[in-house]
Amino acid sequence: MMDLVLPDKAHDEGRQGEALMLETAVTKNGRKLYIESYGCAMNFSDSEIVASILLDQGFETTNDYTIADAIFINTCSIRENAEVRVRNRLKEFKVAKQRNPGMVVGVLGCMAERLKAKFLEEEKLVDLVVGPDAYRDLPNLIEQADGGQRSVNVLLSREETYADISPVRLNTNGINAFVSIMRGCDNMCSFCVVPFTRGRERSRDAISIVKECTDLFNEGYREVTLLGQNVDSYKFTPPQPSPEERGLAEQIGQSKVLPEGEDLGGVAIINFANLLEMVAQINPELRVRFSTSHPKDITDEVLYTIKKYANICKYIHLPIQSGSTRVLDIMNRTYTREWYMNRIDAIRRIMPGCAVSTDVITGFCSETEEEHAETLSMMDYVKFDFAYMFMYSERPGTLAAKRYADDIPEDVKARRLNEVIAKQREHAHLRLLNKIGTIQKVLIEGYSKKSANDYCGRSDENSMVIFPVDERYKPGQYVNVLAERCTTATLMGVIVD
């Protein structure tokens, strides 16, 4: 029977509520930290920052919340079911806290910022409510909680990027790592809470990003994913070196860390294309991915940079949300159907083999059957490799909640979503069928979940590939795999020399 699970969605949903732990932690006999994460990759990356801050305070991680001294749940406000899951989880933690009254329970992240009053008033067991820009304050807040004072810090910052904090790697395979390059979002899509929960957009110091990626490579990691709500709007103004410092950098081969960039009134600007190049130049064996791009901002310069470097993966996540220009307008996406098609055409022209994934929302406010059909026709035009697909769920506080009625019946939303899912399965399968007979460069990530006799890994285009174990190769190495067959979600083949 064919596997009908779409790979990206399965990967994302499979990590929801995951207990994060430092695999190689040295026992300090200190206080035990249990941290559970929901939502996007940025939230999981933030949990690593939280763990780094608290490990410096003597904490050690555990995957058993019943023995923890501090329980933190890192939350997401994007979808309604995430809130339901978090509230249900807090009820389970309440039992553990009754056994251990000294336990500190905290809610972190996007939901913390949006629902701070409710968590303190309704969820009586919550001691701390901490927003995504306030993690440095955790040691102080925990100290207050130890003294019996319930605390909240959800202040948003225009500067905080945690650039100087080296995140510990939780639940890592030692091969793939997330690297945050920016925080916040300025786009104000009408359905989205992120600008309100994560604040304004700000880019992290490029030199610190390159250093973190270099350190990861030296530690044995072979793939980094650069994270941001909208990576294409990354822009960093580095301190300008003196002529003597620039000359020294060029002498020691580090001129890429001090690029001329785009000259605006004598100030050098490092944009996303520049940053991609800087990370790619660390080592050809370091594979580079990124997420997420915005259709209004992705430039030909970025596409040509991806094409230029073999180690920048030929895979772009480019959310469409809707195929209708009118719906895109009331979503405040700031591009049209035609603009999106232009960006797809550019990707196909510059990198014909590049994989493209997307996000789709069905049943947005006032969406007609004809507009839903436009989304389906857009899917036919692009034939996405992967997709995240959801019914519209109104989020309190968003522009859509204030301006538009959530007027599409749930059964209509569900039927439209099922039509989108069916079409995506068809296209994903077609994309994989077209790869049969080709040789895919695969980074071995570990053993297949279904068999210790098979390895699994991802191709450059982000396809999951399964192939028999060959004792000559180990996880963390690249192999060439001849794709021989596929399901709707996975390529299967054999290593070829």
Image (cartoon, helix red, strand yellow):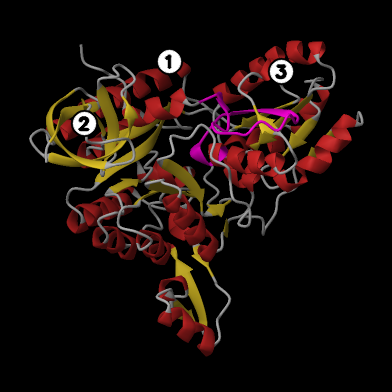
Residue 285 rendering spot, x and y as whole percentages? 31, 53
Residue 333 rendering spot, x and y as whole percentages? 45, 48
Assess disc 1: are there few (<14), some (14-19) or many (≥20) residues with their C-alpha within 10 Å of its C-alpha: few
Whether residue 323 is visible to the viewer of this picture, yes or no, is no
The answer to whether residue 53 is left or right of residue 445 is: right
- Which of pointers 3 and 2 indicates the residue nearer the eye? 3
| Residue range of the region highlighted in magenta in the rendering | 16-43
Q: Is mark 1 on a helix, strand or loop?
A: helix
Which residue is denoted by mark 2 in the rendering?
427
Q: What element carries label 3?
A: helix
Which residue is denoted by mark 1 in the rendering?
411
| Mark-to-mark CA distance, 2 and 1 | 24 Å
Q: Does the magenta stretch include residue 33?
A: yes
Please determine whether, in this image, residue 23 is positioned above or below residue 350.
Answer: above
126 or 285, which lies in front?
285
Which residue is denoted by mark 3 in the rendering?
67
Whether residue 168 is visible to the viewer of this picture, yes or no, is yes
Q: What residue type is disc 2 on?
A: His
The answer to whether residue 73 is left or right of residue 237 is: right
Assess disc 3: are there few (<14), some (14-19) or many (≥20) residues with their C-alpha within 10 Å of its C-alpha: some
| Mark-to-mark CA distance, 3 and 2 | 47 Å
- Which of pointers 1 and 3 indicates the residue nearer the eye? 3
329 or 454, which lies in front?
454
